Image (tube, grey):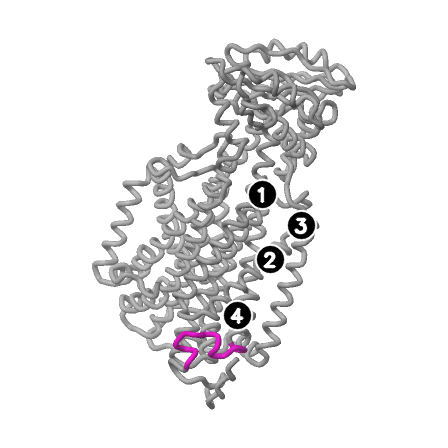
Amino acid sequence: MTTLPKRLAGAPGGSRGKWFVLLAWLILAVALGPLAGKLGEVEETGPNAFLPQGAESAKVNTELEKFRTDTLMPAVVVYTGEGAAAKVGADRPRLAPLVAQGEQLPPAVRSDDGEALMVVVPLSYEDEVTDRIEELRDIAGANAPPGVRAEVGGPAGSLTDSVAVFDTLDSTLMIATGLVVAVLLLITYRSPLLWLFPLLSVGFAAVLTQVGTYLLAKYGHLPVDPQSAGILMVLVFGVGTDYALLLIARYREELHRQEDRHEAMKTALRRSGPAILASAGTVAVGLAALAFADINSSRSMGLVGAVGVVCAFLAMVTVLPALLVIAGRWVFWPFVPRFGAPIRKEATVWSRIGALVARRPRWSWLMSAGVTGVLALSVFGIDMGLRQSEIFQEKPESVVAQALISAHYPSGASDPAKIVTRADRAADVSSAVRDVRGVARVEDGDRTPDGRLATLQVVLADAPDSTAAKDTVDRLRDAVRTVDGAGALVGGATAQTLDTQRAADRDLRTVIPVVLVVVLVVLILLLRALVAPLLLLATVVLSYFAALGASNLLFESVFGFAGVDWSIPLMGFVFLVALGIDYNIFLMHRVREEALRIGHARGVLEGLTSTGGVITSAGVVLAATFAVFAALPLVTMAQMGVIVGIGVLLDTFLVRTVLVPALALDLGRRFWWPGRLSVGGGAPDRTVDGSAEERAPERV
């Protein structure tokens, strides 16, 4: 963990090595580029893609594949207003041709209050469901009499609206993220040329990531869904740019010290490489820990993200150094680093901050811990869970249709619970569930061609995504288990929501300890200490709770979200702990290096001063890339972007700038216990100005 492989670290530095590296990447990009566009072909969009593995609702979906109706997905058209009956009569001849082959268009169902009519249109999976929904909406919206509303929803409508979000997700995220990163790099470097090199390197990383993900999904059964594929590119841009900023900053320093740019790059790689490797390893393994999650979408996001981080790391320690060495010093114009010129001509803002922290370190860390603690208090007021109608920032037509159905029919009429049972016990199962509280009615369904299995459709009295409906599903599952030999399973949309909610709770208890252990081990290996890693891990966890609390305040007061999605606490924790520890790794690796050279106290301040600018730039870039999510129509992705963005900024400007240096200064050499630095290894401690030796701290 402390050094990069010699071939990797030295490859771009040689006179011919840099051209070999660049040529190799160009060949890879040209040869494998066509595969990058095929990632969408292996994305899992089936009914179980976002469900917990082994959940009862997922088993029901699997069993339904044995039925003839496995190719059916209903759309629901709900009509309201005077003249609705005439509108239904006019639409039926045009709706009939859209019905799946072998099916009939059922008659319209009038609501009990007589104010609405509902037509269920069975569509075929084998057709393009989204195209059919568009045709349905054109028919329903055409020639409507004044005062008549016709909205298309149901499972097929919800699927179409969700697909519409993901259809443009990749391109929208790629363009927005690229623009954000380009602008921030221009501001950071104030150079008309230098910003292109990190972006070009990230572009190579993006191609390799998409190719690697496609091949692993196709031949290695790596789960990939549209949401994880969208986040993948943002992650590659974010971490890739972070690593580029750190490497370029160290390379610029070495150009002041060494005349030969090849040697300067070798030194920069050798000295920054361990921190970049530790960071990439922490993020990749932390994300890979999501493989222990039950929810398939969480597993997909973690494993796909780990692939992206590895590819970003490879690009930033190979192709970026090659490009920089080939370009020469002029690429930094107009601020060209000259050999022999001072690295910093005057005191920087980071040296001033360090001096302030050094004057009162204990007060500094208590103050910063207090601020994050106050923000974390808002965690206790979080409303967990979002209904289907609340997952979009702007309500699509399917959500409007569901609201009309809920207002005029039993709320579960558009999407009943599904029971799969042995056919010879179907009557007994039906009898067992009819009297269950919360059941509006029970309807017979279909049978498998061999006659062994049967389905029942259970219309719930409450909205499918309500708490009352989830309680009804629990009662249904208890009821069907009383029928001996039926082997009955309860599924459907409400059961899927319930299973996902409970799996999210289990995943929190399973994945979080794994991530914490992984991060702790990486820090111990990098810093060769125990106290420092434990404290760094504690600060990142505190930062996570502060980010979650602050985000909740924004969700309630600014964005107006109804609650926090069940997946957010786990996803936010994994991303923030894995990504947030980056900046502590960058800082403390440099602090340890300087402490060995000039002593602990001065080493802390020199490390803060040396890394302050680059870490702040990296934090702002990463936060800005994830903030792109806030503009997306899906509430879950917007929430993910907000919490990661706030968490990264807290880590950058408070935890890494004040809390961690203050703790290190307050503890003195004990911060490095039981490592070499804790017992007087390296240079002797001196005061901040280096004028006199410090008295050794008392043992505790």
Mark 2 crowdedness (10 Å alpha carbons): few <14, some 14-19, many ≥20:
many
Q: Earlier in the sequence, mark 1 or mark 3?
A: 3
Residue on which disc 3 sits:
382
Give the secondary structure at mark 1: helix
Q: Which residues are magenta?
A: 665-679
Q: Magenta stretch: dominant SS?
A: helix
Q: Which residue is at 44% across, 73% downward?
A: 591
| Relative image position of residue 445 (x, y in whole percent) | 58, 16
- Name the mark nearer the viewer: 1 or 3: 3
Q: CA distance from mark 3 to mark 4?
A: 28 Å
Q: Is residue 337 left or right of residue 364?
A: left
Residue under the point 47% across and 13% down: 449
**Residue beneath the point at 69% across and 52% down:** 381
C-beta proximity under 8 Å, tags 4 and 2: no
- Disc with the residue nearer the chain's start (4 vs 2): 2
Tell me how far mark 1 sits from mark 2, CA to CA. 18 Å
Nearer the N terminus, badge 3 or badge 4?
A: 3
Q: Residue furthest front?
A: 484
| Mark 2: secondary structure | helix
SS label for mark 3: loop
Amino acid found under the numbered disc labelled 4:
Val
- Viewer-proximal residue among 663 and 504: 504
State the mark number for residue 251.
Answer: none
The residue that disc 1 covers is 636
